[in-house]
Image: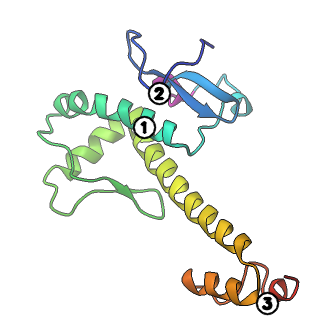
Amino acid sequence: MNAPQTAEASTTASNTRAAYDTSQGSKALDIDAYFTPDPSQSLMSIPLLLPTQNNIDALSQQVSAKMPGFLAAHGIPEAPASISYDAYGQIQLPGDYAYAAQFRAALTDNPVLARQLSTVNALSSQMTEMNKALKFDTEYRAARNPSEVQAVLRQRGRDEPPGGPAALASD
């Protein structure tokens, strides 16, 4: 592996190498190769992308750089205003996006970009939920008595602490 680089894409010919935060530390990855299945590679040897702002930014930059060429290659005059995914991992495009069918078909023809788009969404969703959980945890741990715990729980729309009512009794 090459030495880690900044989140900005390097100037390699394919321009897809950037530093990512992984389960194996910071790694300079060719992100197109990363999202191209390689049956000869053990799944356990592949570093997992972590839900960090660095990864979201780096992968978003890669996707944004590819999108104009992807759209042009498939005769799609404009990108959707937004892209999201449902609970089953299926892409969701705005109802008024005139090129939705073409866009979906083009992603089927380009599974690497499809995986990158869904991964940006997944990392963003994971980071958002982790930040919410960390904020709750900080507030919960800072509560000094049962009434402060109850106030934190009410603020979060919960009636009981994690672990049930017995957790309050042990505070």
* Residue identifier under label 2: 7
Badge 1 amino acid: Asp
Q: Earlier in the sequence, mark 3 or mark 1?
A: 1
- Image location (x, y in percent) of residue 34: 54, 27
Which residue occupies the extreme front position in the image? 144
- List the single residue furthest toward the right: 170
Residue 16 showing in the rendered view: yes
Between 42 and 135, the one lying in front of the other is 135
Range drawn in magenta: 32-37
- Image height of 11 relative to 65, above or below: above
Residue beneath the point at 20% across and 44% down:
79
- Amino acid type, label 2: Ala
Viewer-proximal residue, 116 or 5?
5
Q: Earlier in the sequence, mark 1 or mark 2?
A: 2
Q: Amino acid at mark 3?
A: Pro
Q: For the N terminus, which image quadrant?
A: top right
**Precedes in sequence: disc 2 or disc 3:** 2
User: According to the image, label 3 marks what residue?
Assistant: 165
- Answer whether residue 91 is magenta in the image: no
Residue located 69% across and 33% down the image: 43
Q: Position of residue 25 (x, y in %)?
A: 68, 29
Residue 55 vertical placement versus 65 (above, below):
below
Q: Residues within 10 Å of mark 1 (few under 14, many from 20)?
A: some
Give residue 91's quadrant in the image: bottom left
Circle 1 is placed at which residue position?
Answer: 57
The structure residue drawn at horizontal position 38% and vertical position 37%, both measured from the top left corner, is 60
How far is disc 2 from disc 3 in space, using C-alphas?
Answer: 45 Å
**Left or right of residue 19, residue 40 in this image:** right
